[in-house]
Image (cartoon, grey):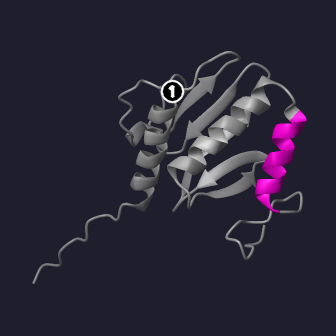
Amino acid sequence: MRKMDNGETEGTEGGPPSQLIDAKIEALGDWRGETLARIRALIRQADPDVVEELKWRGVPVWSHAGIVTTGETYKDAVKMTFAKGAALEDPAGLFNSSLEGNTRRAIDFHEGDKIDEEALKALVRAAVALNTARPARSRKKP
């Protein structure tokens, strides 16, 4: 992959990831494409500086100072995995998958599920804040 002038990284299939994600959504042609498109729009609203990438054979990835979340599509679900989800507060209880791990957390969306848009955007903003937080500098002993 190579960095492009617009801040995106060229996808492995050639072309800007945003166009490849558009094509993936269109190719799905069902509720999964609609759900992925809605999730993508909410991520962009929550963080206008988010960078879109495609990794791991076409999985959409949204990054800001590190991976924020991914958008995987399966036969019966769209899975939104937060790379550092275990470290995030989830007051709305959105996480419903990958709960046993020490690092990641995920949200599985199924056909007909309603997305709590404000809670999801808050979770994305919290993930970005975690990625961009600078660790406290250690003080050197005299």
Give the labeled residue for mark 1: 116
Decide if residue 123 is in sight here. Answer: yes
The quarter of the image holding the N terminus is: bottom right
Is residue 26 shown in magenta? yes
What residue range appears in magenta?
16-27
Looking at numbered disc 1 in the image, what kind of residue is underneath it? Asp
Q: In front: 111, or 79? A: 111
Asked if residue 62 lies left or right of residue 85, the reply is: right
The picture places residue 132, in percent across and down from the top left corner, at 42, 61
Image quadrant of residue 112?
Answer: top right
Q: In front: 69, or 99? A: 69
Decide if residue 57 is in sight here. Answer: no
Q: Is residue 71 above or below residue 75?
A: below
Q: Dot 1 surroundings within 10 Å: few (below 14), some, or many (20 or more)?
A: few
Q: Is residue 53 above or below residue 105?
A: below
Q: Residue at x 71, y 56 (%)?
A: 53
The picture places residue 85, in percent across and down from the top left corner, at 46, 39
